[in-house]
Amino acid sequence: MEELSAFKRFVRKWKRQSKVLRFFYVLFFIVYTVGLVLFTKSVLSLAGIETVVRVIVLLFFYVHLFVLGLGGLLLLYTNKKKLLTGLLVLSGLYSGLFGFAYYYVEKTYNIIDSVQKKYVNYTSVMVSLKDKSEFSTIGIISSKEDPTGYVIPKMMIEEHSIKGKLVEYDDYISMMSDMYDGKIDAMFVAESYVTMFSTYEKFTNVGTETKVVYTMTKELENVDNVTYSTKKLTEPFTLLLMGVDSTGDGIASGASFNGDSLMLITFNPKTLNATVFSIPRDTYVPIACRNGAENKINSSAYGGTSCVVKTIENLTGIEIDYYLKVNFTGVVKLVDDLGGISLDIPISFCEQDSQRRFGEHLICLEKGYQKINGEQALAFARHRKTLALGDFQRVQHQQMVVEAMARELRNIKSVEDFYKLLDDVANNIDTNMSTNQILSLYGVAKDMLINMMGEEDFLTIEKTFLTGYDLTMYVDSYRSFVYTFQYYKQSLDDIVHLMKVNLELEKPKLRKSFEFDINEEYKPYVTGKNYYKEEKRELLPNFVGNSKSAVEAWANERNISVTFKEEESSSPVGQIISQSAHHGKLVSLVEKLEVTVSKGGSSVTPPSGDEGEGDPVEETLPDFQGWSIQQFHSWKNKLKGTNLVIDLVELSVDDLLTLEGIDLKKDMIYKQSSPKGTKIADISTLKVYYYKEETQKEE
């Protein structure tokens, strides 16, 4: 009864107070409480960021809630209007602060959370060569987890009632080769197949030689969204940066990337030191998702991110903690968000714009130090046609762009600029880092901001260069000769050691030699860029025309099993007429060899009329540059006893960029796929490129 009586007295006293003050007291108490709850939720979501500060701030505002609730009531009852008004105004200001903080924290959290793409729009197409109209056999990837090679094609087959017999393949390259060779009529592949295959000589013109029969897009769970590490980003970690070279905006479209740009980065947040290892796309390595079969490293991208990660881990022996897939077209927006970047452009060049357009859309840059915008930065990162070192020089340019962007981060001065940059970053990258792991980078970013005050190079980036040699070999999956880059093991070992030192896994080795010339500009040491004496990989010779004893001697030296069989032939008795393994293949892949020897007995039919009569047999390729098409056809007609496939190809607009300044003449040859002096017996295909005036005028 006493408690009830006390409550009644409280209510009677409450009713005697000013209605206006009562209203504002209740209103501000509710607004403050709701605001504080939302503020608490947002502050607690910032895991790992200034934990002590967050706890102190929350305690302060909860103490104020107590003061507002109890103290405000006492002020109201004692009719101290001025103090109560001051308390309510202060609480209102705090409530506004809560709303402001909640909005920006939630906005930041949602943007960061969107970096890891949970679902992706995958697009699969059924393609065939342009002259095909019936599809009795169709290639499909055997892996049932492949969204564009199997999952969506199965849906497409059902929707369009496709009746062709399905032929399963373990990889896309063999499937595309079989379609080109007429073994299948069509195939299922990702929509970005032109980007995937056009970098290979056999499929240079895949965009114009094929057609899309059916297309289907489906939103599916991101197959690359897997976690590789739980390591905190406050410890030394590894990051694999992968380039998606698309013309689209954003990365959620799920286009299969071509793996042309692969950078393995190690970062030590304690020392703010990073190492960058750019892996040339043609590097010949064992591919993890193909049971260790060797191929160009960019082909690992066809097996998805997990295949790329595992392939590089096997190559380096270093565990990859995180990956970051970047849409390079997004570089345009990111650089523009930063207000441009300053670079010393080493050469003058012209390149397509971000949409792969020529003509008035060409991006041209002059040599020299300058500030460039996003389109110019992307053109610089993409260009390789006129570079002396081709792809090797291009990856160095990409490193320069990344470094320049890191330097420009200090110029962000407004909240709007920060969120515009953050939004564009999130839209153009995909990663396996969790939101909390990304938030843990706050501590690293804070250290960088502290160190960058007044410092030009607050972040140390150690560059590397993988040294090796070019090797054009016959690859079974391509059914043709393919250019590859063979790395020197010692060069890779030096690079791996540098990365492991930065990861604190190994102790640094003392460099015993150092050269310095006061008259020359000092250049920082580049790990891996050295002269290494290593034995080069051997290719299988073409034994056709040789003797049985020569083959036996060669095979015995290499412990290769060789068997012989005889066949009737027009060739001299005892002469080799064929071999089971294709010449130009890596000797390390040949365990046994079957060789066919001529036993004579077949008559030779002499050529009729004057066709080829008296003409010398061509053994090596001449230099066709400067020849007319008529001269080339005359040479071609004299070729006898060869299965060489010859293609005459018009120069593309891309090719013309490399011939700038040359007075081009109609039907004149300017390029050839194999150089002068190449043995005709050592190649299976030859492409000769000529200028067709009418076509270029139309373009």
Image (tube, grey):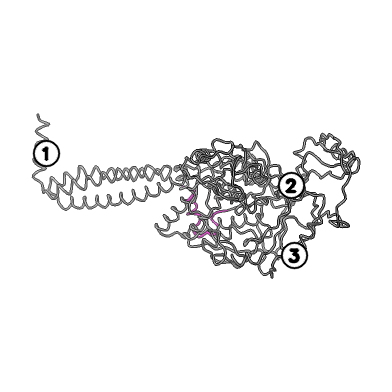
Look at mark 3 in the image and give the residue it sits on. 628
Q: In the rendering, at what x and y percent does residue 41 appear?
A: 34, 42
Look at mark 2 in the image and give the residue it sits on. 473
Residue 231 seen in the figure = no
Q: Which residue is found at the position 44% from the left and 53% from the top?
A: 422
- On screen, residue 322 versus residue 643, left or right, reads left
Q: Say whether marks 1 and 2 touch (CB < 8 Å).
A: no
Was residue 128 drawn as part of the magenta stretch in this picture?
Answer: no
Rendered-image quadrant of the C terminus: bottom right
- On screen, residue 20 versus residue 536, left or right, reads left
Rendered-image quadrant of the N terminus: top left
Q: In the rendering, at what x and y percent does residue 525 appear?
A: 67, 54
SS class, disc 1: helix
Q: Which residue is found at the position 20% from the left and 42% from the top?
A: 70
* Label disc, if present, on residue 232 of the rendered structure: none
Q: Considering depth in this image, is 309 or 681 the residue closer to the camera? A: 681
